[in-house]
Amino acid sequence: MTVMTAKICIIGSGPAGLFTAIKLVRHGVDDIVMFEKNSVSFGGLMNDCKLNFDHRIGMDIEELQLTESEVYQHLAEIKEVFKNSGYCTKVTDPNAPEIKKWIDRFAVHDMELVVAEQFHCGSDNAKHLIRYLIGFLEDKVELRKRTGIEEIEFDGEKFTLKDSYGDEHFCDILVVTPGRSGAYWFREQARKLGIKFRFGEIDVGLRVELNAKVLDPLTSKIYDPKVKYLTKKYRDKVRTFCVNPHGRVRLEHYDGFKLVNGDALMKHKTPNTNFAILQTIKLTEPLADTTRYGRFIAYSVNLLGDNTPIAQRLGDLKRGRRSKKSNFYDSTRYDCMPTLKLITVGDISLSYPKRIMDNLLEFMEQLDKVLPGIMSDSTILYAPEIKFYDTRYLTDKNLKVEGFENLFIGGDGVGKSRGIVGASLNGLMIAEGILKLLGKN
Ligand SMILES: Cc1cc2nc3c(=O)[nH]c(=O)nc-3n(C[C@H](O)[C@H](O)[C@H](O)COP(=O)(O)OP(=O)(O)OC[C@H]3O[C@@H](n4cnc5c(N)ncnc54)[C@H](O)[C@@H]3O)c2cc1C
């Protein structure tokens, strides 16, 4: 067993961890070790990388205890880093002349269109972008790839981390930014460490894939349109998320099940567009644990799909029947072929709760009024699409955990962000907290 000591340890190299490290290094802090259980940054940076620079998207400023102007100061710093990389292109300008017309069209049908300043990097640029970001870490940060942290212990002063090789690491300051894939793991550690938390909301929904022609008129102006709607039947909140014009549907691997997601490449375009429609779910008693509920739905779909997500044609769902392999891929019948191959063709309504299905279909019908073609029989629905970021830990303005002087947490895995820019913002907040602690602010 090896024993190692560092001033600062960071668990997770996604945008939250990376931006913590970048800011610390920029302020002359060294002796930092960053642990990553995969190769570097398996999170969103390795994926599509659409960047939304708007306080209404991907963050909850009340939860973060920030004012709008504080947020925009941080966002300017993040934008500068991404823009200077040369790998990200501005794809949406909220001040473009056509935008107002689109906002009005959605408003007529009781929907809100939120338009943010948006950049896109694309999965094909991801490796270059990550290499660029890692360049900021110089020799001040030791990056330990493929080294998962399994246990966190605290003796009242220092932290001990036990990694997947059985080695131990001591540090004075600990930053935990484990992303959604590490959310469940961290919750167990938090319980052990006596960190207080409450359950927040999760998003459960579907990935929708259709012929790109349906959304082209909108996505050519607004790359990733964010539409919000309150359903009439249940008064539940639904929204579009992660629109990928001419993109691909992707698999996301979790411990014990698979989810669907989507991305788009900068250089290779498909004839399809995909996007998520999500319902926000909050539970009270007797079960407030939304993660357990979300995992139950994910297991249920994976069970029926023989350990694979399920895909269904909207035409079949509308008629109350399962989709069948024999005609699912018939291009004379449908104008959109699935970009995700590892799927089981079946019936989503067998494993999704009725209320969720009702809400999502009502939302799609509403969207179809502005973008005719969404309700086409060809449209493909994929499940499960679930966003786990529901456990809310009590933290201060620098994401320092209540009851600890030297423990900071951030990013999607601890419910403080919902996207790359929000997670990067968390990183900057944490770095500022550490700089204060080190007397360097
Ligand atoms: C396919 C896909 C496409 C996406 N596209 C977009 C997009 O276009 N725009 C957008 O804003 N967001 C997108 N997202 C969401 C985005 O990835 C996240 O919001 C963002 O990455 C969160 O950053 P994070 O730092 O909190 O976590 P992550 O980026 O998930 O990073 C956390 C890291 O911690 C590591 N880790 C976890 N536990 C441990 C442990 N115990 N020990 C060591 N390492 C550990 C993980 O391997 C991971 O690399 C996408 C996500 C996916 C999956």
Image (cartoon, rainbow, N blue to C red):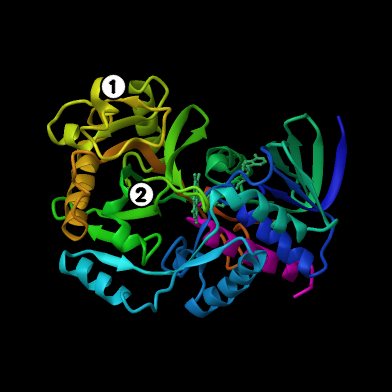
Q: Quadrant of the N terminus?
A: top right
Whether residue 265 sits left or right of residue 239 in the image: it is right
178 or 65, nearer to the observer: 178
- Residue 121 picture quarter: bottom right
- Residue position for label 1: 325
The nearer-to-camera label among 1 and 2 is 1
The picture quadrant where one finds residue 87 is: bottom right
Looking at the image, residue 85 sits to the left or right of residue 188; the answer is right
**233 w.r.t. 168: above or below:** below
Tell me, yes or no, whether the highlighted magenta stretch contains residue 416.
yes
Which residue lies at the image location 62% right of the left edge and 66% below the top edge? 429
**Callout 1: 10 Å neighbours few (<14), some, many (20+)?**
few
Mark 1 is on which residue type? Lys
Give how far across and how far down residue 56 sits, in percent.
41, 68
Answer few, some or many: residues within 10 Å of disc 2's Cα (few below 14, many 20 plus, some between 14 and 19).
many
User: What is the x, y in percent for residue 9?
Assistant: 75, 50
Mark yes or no: residue 258 visible: yes
Name the residue beneath numbered marker 2: 275
Q: Amino acid at mark 2?
A: Phe
**Considering only vertical position in the picture, is 227 above or below 342?**
below
Inspect this view and state whether residue 405 appears: no
State the SS at label 1: helix
- Residue sitting at x 35%, y 60%: 219
Task: Indicate yes or no whether the magenta region holds residue 420.
Answer: yes
Residue extending furthest toward the front: 332
Quadrant location of the C terminus?
A: bottom right
As displayed, is residue 6 above or below residue 313? Answer: below
State which region is magenta: 414-441
Q: Earlier in the sequence, mark 1 or mark 2?
A: 2
Question: Residue 359 at x, y = what percent?
Answer: 21, 47
**Front residue of this view, candidates 399 and 203:** 203
